[in-house]
Image (cartoon, helix red, strand yellow):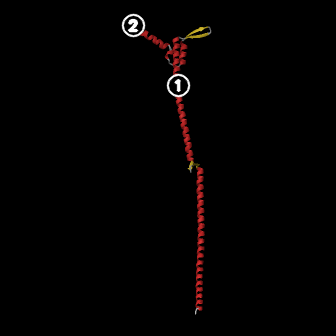
């Protein structure tokens, strides 16, 4: 008897739980909202009035379904908020990355410009212009060197000609002096001879 009472007690205590678990699919929360709605409609009683058909749905099932809808909306709202914050974070990262890329592009352009230019006397010149100026200077210096060498050679030639002319003039002067000395000596002798002749 005691076991029979336990059995009856267990039967009555688990019956509402089993009825609730098997009878109300909206309270289960399993499946999508659409499948829960279809289950509620399929398990509801029909009612006809003329050509129109109605479904009689128990209030507790509607309440459970509305709770599931509210929970789903809250879940989706939370998920949308999370996705929006993730989107905002990703957009911020994209903006930061775009800014970094722009900075790097500017730095690369600046480095390319520095690589393609050469500083000369405080001015930034293109490498082609710099090469043209340097080669012009080298050619100009070579021409100046050749002119200097040519004028030195001409001056050296003129110098040797002048030296020969001077040596020639010095030699003529020396010969002229010698001949004058000879003439003077001859004149002195003659004068002395004349003086000696006139003296008694």
**In the rendered view, would you say 140 is above or below 61?**
below
Viewer-side residue, 85 vs 172 = 172
| Quarter location, residue 196 | bottom right
**In the rendered view, would you say 129 is above or below 17?**
below
Asked which secondary structure carries label 2, the reply is helix
Viewer-side residue, 14 vs 101 = 101
Find residue 86 and report its horizontal and vertical position in percent: 52, 28
Residue sticking out furthest to the top:
1
Find residue 66 and report its horizontal and vertical position in percent: 53, 16
Residue sticking out furthest to the left:
2
- Mark carried by residue 198: none
Asked which secondary structure carries label 1, the reply is helix
Residue under circle 1? Answer: 81
Quadrant holding the N terminus: top left
Number of marks in the image?
A: 2
Decide if residue 3 is on the left or right side of residue 78. left
Q: Which residue is painted at 60% across and 69% down in the image?
A: 158
Q: Earlier in the sequence, mark 1 or mark 2?
A: 2
Find residue 195 and report its horizontal and vertical position in percent: 59, 89
The local crowd at label 2, few if under 14, some if 14 to 19, many if 20 or more residues have their Cα within 10 Å, is few
Find residue 179 and report its horizontal and vertical position in percent: 59, 82
Quadrant holding the C terminus: bottom right
Q: Which residue is painted at 61% across and 10% down in the image?
A: 52
Viewer-side residue, 171 vs 133 = 171
Residue under circle 2? Answer: 5
Residue sticking out furthest to the bottom:
200
The local crowd at label 1, few if under 14, some if 14 to 19, many if 20 or more residues have their Cα within 10 Å, is few
Asked if the residues shown at circle 1 and circle 2 are in contact, with their CB atoms under 8 angstroms apart, the answer is no
Q: Which residue is painted at 53% across and 34% down in the image?
A: 96
């Amino acid at each position: 008897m005691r076991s029979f009472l336990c059995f009856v007690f267990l039967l009555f205590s688990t019956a509402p739980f089993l009825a609730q678990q098997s009878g109300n699919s909206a309270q289960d929360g399993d499946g999508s909202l659409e499948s829960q709605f279809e289950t509620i409609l399929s398990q509801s009683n029909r009612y006809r009035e003329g050509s129109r058909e109605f479904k009689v749905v128990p209030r507790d099932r509607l309440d459970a379904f509305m709770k599931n809808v509210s929970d789903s909306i809250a879940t989706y709202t939370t998920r949308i908020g999370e996705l929006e914050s993730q989107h905002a974070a990703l957009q911020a990262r994209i903006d930061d990355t775009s800014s970094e890329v722009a900075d790097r592009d500017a730095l690369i352009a600046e480095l390319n410009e520095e690589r393609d230019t050469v500083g000369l006397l405080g001015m930034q010149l293109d490498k082609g212009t710099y090469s043209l100026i340097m080669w012009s200077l080298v050619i100009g210096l070579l021409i100046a060197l050749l002119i200097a060498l040519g004028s030195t050679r001409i001056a050296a030639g003129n110098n040797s000609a002048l030296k020969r002319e001077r040596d020639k003039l010095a030699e003529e002067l020396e010969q002229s002096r010698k001949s004058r000395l000879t003439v003077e000596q001859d004149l002195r002798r003659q004068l002395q001879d004349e003086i000696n002749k006139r003296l008694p």
